[in-house]
Amino acid sequence: MPETPAPPPPSHDHGAARIARILAFIGGAVVVGLALLVTVSVVLRWFDLGGINGDFEMVQMGLALAVFAFLPLCQAHRGNVMVDTFTTWLPPRAQAALDALWDLVYAGFAGFVAWRLAIGATEAFTSRTTTMVLGLPQHYAIGACSGMAAFLAMIALLTALRRVRANG
Amino acid sequence: MSGLSLAIWGFVGMLALIGLRMPVGLAMLATGSAGYLAIAGWPAFLNYMKATPYFLFSNYTLSVIPLFILMGAFAERSGLSQDLFRAASALIGHRRGGMAMAVIGACTAFGAICGSSVATTATFGRAALPELERYRYAPSLATGTIAVGGTLGILIPPSVILVVYAISTEQNIVKLFQAALIPGLLATLFYCLAIGWSVRRRPDLAPPHAKPSGAERLRAFLTVWPVLVVAIVVVGGIYGGVFTPTEGAAVGAIAMLAIALLRRSLSWEGFKTSLVQTAETTALIFIILLGAEVFNAFLAFSQLPTTVAAMITEAGLAPYAVLVILLAFYILLGAVMDELAMILLTLPVFFPIVTALDFGLPSDEVAIWFGILVLIVVGIGLTAPPIGLNVFVINAIARRIPITETYKGVLPFLATDLVRLGLCVAFPGLSLAMVRWLS
């Protein structure tokens, strides 16, 4: 059923899932960092010291990076919202086969997104696209998201494999 | 095939895939991509996907979602939510049904620092359920109360659902937060009344216990005042325009972390768990946002939203009849579908219909009012059988209590939800008073 369970203790994660967990933790640290940045900016503004220039842009860029860092762990823990009410009559093996199939579809989409974002990053590089205020180059961020999407594709393949093995 | 029939097949296909266990976000992404390809072709789709996933996620307004989730996670991991419940139960717990009312009260306070109903349900499932069992409250009342209490996480601003509504309809998020306050507090009041009614009818549901001493009550309150101050500063600051919602969420998350560190109640493990919990909850919301973005791009190409909107407007139905039909549709759909996905997929069709109707209000006020009505029906969908997300969350925590018991416990609250929805439909002023007063 759709749910957001408390994540299992770290000992449950092995190999790639461990990396996904570390990546998610780093993404979380980025969010804490953004919160700190914005808080400092707000406090400075209260004292009429003008706030931090471009905090807006850093929040935008940091958010995209953090979200892409979060996605693999969610897949590794099968945290995505799904509805199992209408398939309870199926034998468990058929259910697992369906889940494995959707993992493969997810892997396909994640791989596709990784490919498209890699193209997007290259274009941002050649056109020297930067943010408005701070002039931060966009291609690093888009490229990093592409890499994390590729990792997500790998995680989805692994979860598919694990389901097939468990029911082989 | 015409765009219109493609769109209808798109909806059918998406629902079928969801029924076949496909994750909701992925089902929208897959059918949306297929429809996009069928109408616009490969080159356009390849170009679209080059930047969309990145720029959708780098939306400043969306940043309040992980920040508010983070603030709630810090509060939970450092035991602040448990303290909130203890303070509320020290205050009113000795009355008949008082421990259940304390859950509602604590959820209301927690709702002001957390924007997610699932997080609120899970938090109080862990913090309050053992206490309710210790005082021998009936299982149905205990889990039912926590399941509906969890909806206060979104009914009391801030609210993930309102953020998503604001973005997909291009409305002012601060005004939506303002408008949600009175209906949210009304929910608190009605839930307490429902508990009072239930225990008066069946006193065995909630055995009374001794009143704590004045000193105990004071001590319980003293542990929670910092949280209450943060909640008031964050929500008040956003209302008063002192800071944007993102800034409020950031300040709140840092303040909550600071409180936890000063109280020495957040371990390194707890800190890590907070971040990972934020990661998982954020990820599952954003994957649905991405799926809805692609599916809605396909819908826009198919012109289904404009066609249906024109059809309904030309049918010449009474505005209130249309509104009631839409809300009834939401309640039915919300009973079997994920609520976030539901509003993301239907708003492109429903929003233009509603704002074009004449309710004797300016159309920007109708937009805000409709947002609050949508929020209320989403809350109903989260607890109503057969698929109430909050009920599943609490049942995952309280495995010994059968799910039918929880649904039984939820029913009196659902009745008050319908009354509250009716009141908010009949009196738009309940939602709009705060907005008018603060502007």
Image (cartoon, coloured by chain):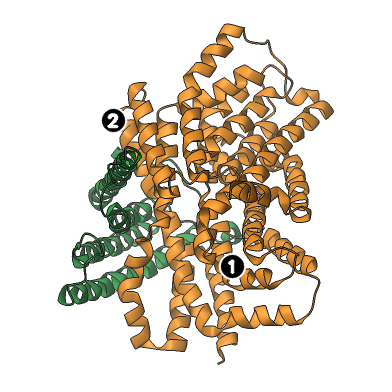
Chain colours: A green, B orange
Q: Is residue B147 left or right of residue B81?
A: right
Q: Relative to residue B375, is residue B315 depicted above or below? A: below
Secondary structure under tag 1 reads helix
Relative image position of residue B244 (x, y in whole percent) = 43, 49
In the depicted structure, whether residue A47 falls above or below residue A77: above
Viewer-nearest residue: A127 or B404: A127
Q: Nearer the viewer, residue A88 or A131?
A: A131
Relative side of B389 to B69, left or right: right
Residue B164 position, x and y percent, is 51, 58
What residue sits 42% from the left and 52% below the top? A79
SS category of the residue bearing label 2: helix
Q: Name, please, the residue furthest toward the bottom.
A: B1
What residue did someone put label 1 on? Answer: B347
Q: Nearer the viewer, mark 1 or mark 2?
A: 1
Residue indicated by mark 2? B268
- C-alpha distance separating marks 1 and 2: 42 Å
Which image quadrant is residue B98 in?
A: top right
The residue type indicated by label 2 comes to: Trp
**Badge 1 sits on which subunit?**
B
Q: Which residue is painted at 51% across and 40% down in the image?
A: B235
Contact between labelled residues 2 and 1, with CB atoms less than 8 Å apart = no
Mark nearer the N terminus (1 vs 2): 2
Locate residue B397, reporting x and y percent: 53, 37
Q: Position of residue A61 (x, y in %)?
A: 28, 58
Disc 1 crowd, CA 10 A, few/some/many (<14, 14-19, 20+): some
- The reply to whether residue A1 is in sight is no
